[in-house]
Image: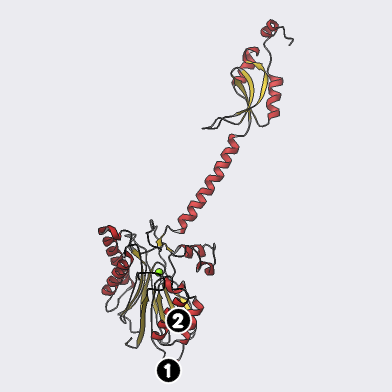
Amino acid sequence: MTTEGLRWAVRTDVGRVRQQNEDTVHADGTVFVVADGMGGHLAGEVASALAVSTIASRCAGGVGSLDQLGEAVREANRRVIEQSNDDPEREGMGTTVVAAVRMSNESSCRLALVNVGDSRAYRFDGHRLLQLSRDHSLVQELVDDGIISPSDARHHPRRNIVTRALGIDPDVQLDLWETTVEPGQRILLCSDGLVDEVDEPTIESILRVETEAESAADRLVEIANEHGGRDNISLVIFGDPAPNGDLLPPTEEIAIPIEKPSNIDAGTPSTRRIGHRAAKVVLATATALALTVMLVLALIWVRSGFVVTFDDDQVVVLRGREVLWFEPTQVAVGPYERNELDRVSQDLVRQAPRFDRLEDAETFVAERLVRDQTFAQDAGIDT
Ligand code: MG
């Protein structure tokens, strides 16, 4: 379709595996949205449809500022949460959203963009495909932390866990930014059902060959299904055709202002899940590691040292300390009982002197403890 020189195409396809299509798409020449719903019992498609209809109605005619788009998305978030709270069957439903809206106060084709979740916005400048949005997903955080490579992320078993979505957190954090569509450039919005099946070089080559939005959209859905179609496949392509077919030089990546992600609670019964932030995972791992190290050090400390003491009036050498459920263990028995020792020696043992080495403890027993003279005489022992 076209309006004011802008051409666009929109597709949503159930794919080859899923029974339902939980994605919702919208394009009217001013507002372009892709939302990927999640949640059981048809809740995902309710969430994505609610989000898209709210954003489309609140942004009809374009937006004058990023704040206006942001408020529309926050309104969508509130409505998804309200429906989720009102209907037990829809509890926990959520949706990603990526949207581009023409700015009404700009003469050029300036766009306001928003992203929450792992649906994506790309720009194709006639030469290169450039991802404009940043995924809010577990695997993206693993990539950012250098734990996995971007190519590993496409096949990671937990690639469907998103860290942000509408419908979860009343104070949802949004990525909001502005960009332009120059003549010869196209914007692609899509759900993960496209990019999980079709890698970016292939998308780029299709957009290069298929210069019409409609034919490009058809080919992208077709190849995603050829590669398996394991998820719903949704996309919007729009752009301003180049005058005389000229192509602009490649564009540079724009900086996207990214707000700090919020913590998001438990997942849903859907195959797509809303996960804890990877930072939480990393923090939990670091905490567990620190606790393990502390426990090992505590065990070493508890088992360290030797003490000379009485055990049922028998002089003994014990190893370790009595802490919580740990008991020192007996490693040597001295030649004396309590009543065999003189008073000074009894006092020494009562103080339970501690030694680092067993030999030192044994030397103490042999050299510092003295037999009581009266006891020795009564027992006929030479001292
Ligand atoms: Mg999906």
- Which one is nearer the viewer's eye here, 35 or 218? 218
Q: Residue at x 45, y 72 (%)?
A: 255
- Which residue is rendered at x = 41% and y = 70% of the image? 17
For mark 2, what is the residue?
Answer: 124
The residue most toward the bottom is: 244
Q: Is residue 161 left or right of residue 106?
A: right
Q: Is residue 242 above or below residue 18?
A: below
58 shown above or below 373? below
Question: Is residue 243 at all visible to an observer of this figure?
Answer: yes
**Marks 1 and 2, how far apart at CA:** 18 Å
Residue 87 versus residue 27: which sits nearer the camera? Answer: 87
Whether label 1 lies within 8 Å of ligand 1 gets the answer no
In the rendered structure, which amino acid carries the disc numbered 2?
Phe
**Residue type marked 1:** Asn
Residue under pointer 1: 244
Measured as percent of width and height from the top left, residue 291 is found at 52, 45
